[in-house]
Image (spheres, helix red, strand yellow):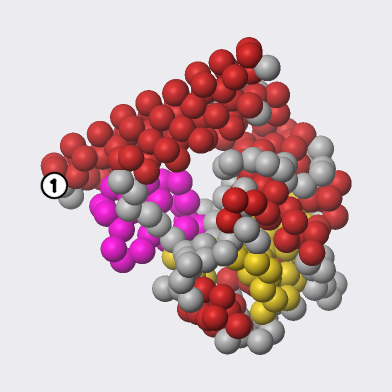
Amino acid sequence: MPQTNVSVIIPTLNAGTMIDDLLTSLEHQRRVPDEIIVVDSSSDDDTRDLVRRHPEVRLIVIDRKDFNHGGTRDMALRESSGDFVLFLTQDALPESDQYIDAVLAPFKQERVALVYGRQIPRADARPAETLVREFTYGPSSFTITPQDVRRLGINAFRASDVCAAYRRTSYLEVGGFENPVLTNEDMFIAARLLHAGWHVVYEAQAAVIHSHNFTWRQQYKRNYLQGVEMEKHRDILGSAPITGEGFAMVGHTMKGLLAQGKIIDMGSFFIDCVFRYVGNRKGKIDAKRAARRA
């Protein structure tokens, strides 16, 4: 791959406990990014002060009410200059100093438009969360082409802006992230890229440390928003259900917990899955009702 510019974009909100470590890690990568942009949604803590300790980092401050997952990232990308633009969330820490090298490597193939990386659970991750991450982000890399969409259905569009990289030209060709979009902007642009003939790569060597210990209420809200957006985007996602992959993930996690003797965790994870399912269904139902009223 010829010499190119690389930009990194990080949206933040009250990231004071994380942002300094993340920026320091990026500044010590073997392939140092040419540009780092932090877009802060008017944090209440010391996030902006910590960012300013890194003089090479560009800080953009927006009003919190103006943030959305698609529009804010699209704005930042259009403000950036990189031929390849990397997105990280504030709580994703590169596992090694070779993260940027690894996430850029698949772009040697000229039809690759989007690369997303592996998420390694944090040391404090609950047993179920660890197993879910292991199931979703395995150790083997793979490439999704337009020819795979019919076979894989909605699973072909899996991607995550927790740690992802985009070829600027292909991103702009398909119009970029939508504005506004509440969640899953990465899945929707992956679908548009594949429909336009581009390829999407899961690169397991590009790993970050990232996981969540969500409460049941948080799982419900998160999956409600996903249900809303996925129903609104049926035109690009198709009609393939997501329940098959969900059942596979539940089976993998339950078996893993049973093997570990984590009986209480099995019960807690079952309830967690109920909140996920109910939230997703309610989101879809509400989106359908809103569409009929429109």
Asked if the magenta segment contains residue 128, the reply would be yes
As drawn, the residue found furthest toward the top would be 292
Tell whether 140 sits left or right of 5: left
Q: Nearer the viewer, residue 100 or 74?
A: 74
> Magenta residues, as a range?
118-139
Asked if the magenta segment contains residue 287, the reply would be no
Q: Nearer the viewer, residue 167 or 255?
A: 167
- From this view, report whether residue 148 is shown above or below residue 190: above
Pick the quarter of the image with the C terminus: top right
Q: Nearer the viewer, residue 144 or 39?
A: 39
The answer to whether one can see residue 215 in this image is yes
Q: How many marks?
A: 1
The answer to whether one can see residue 202 in this image is no
Q: Quadrant of residue 40?
A: bottom right
- From this view, report whether residue 75 is shown above or below residue 243: below
Pick the quarter of the image with the N terminus: bottom right
Q: Which residue is mark 1?
A: 261
Identified by mark 1, the residue type is: Gly
For image coordinates 46% across by 71% down, the residue present is 45
Q: Residues within 10 Å of mark 1 (few under 14, many from 20)?
A: few
Q: The residue tagged with tag 1: helix, strand or loop?
A: loop
For image coordinates 38% across by 54% down, the residue present is 212
Residue 230 picture location, percent across and down: 58, 30
Q: Nearer the viewer, residue 197 or 61?
A: 61
Residue 285 picture location, percent across and down: 50, 19
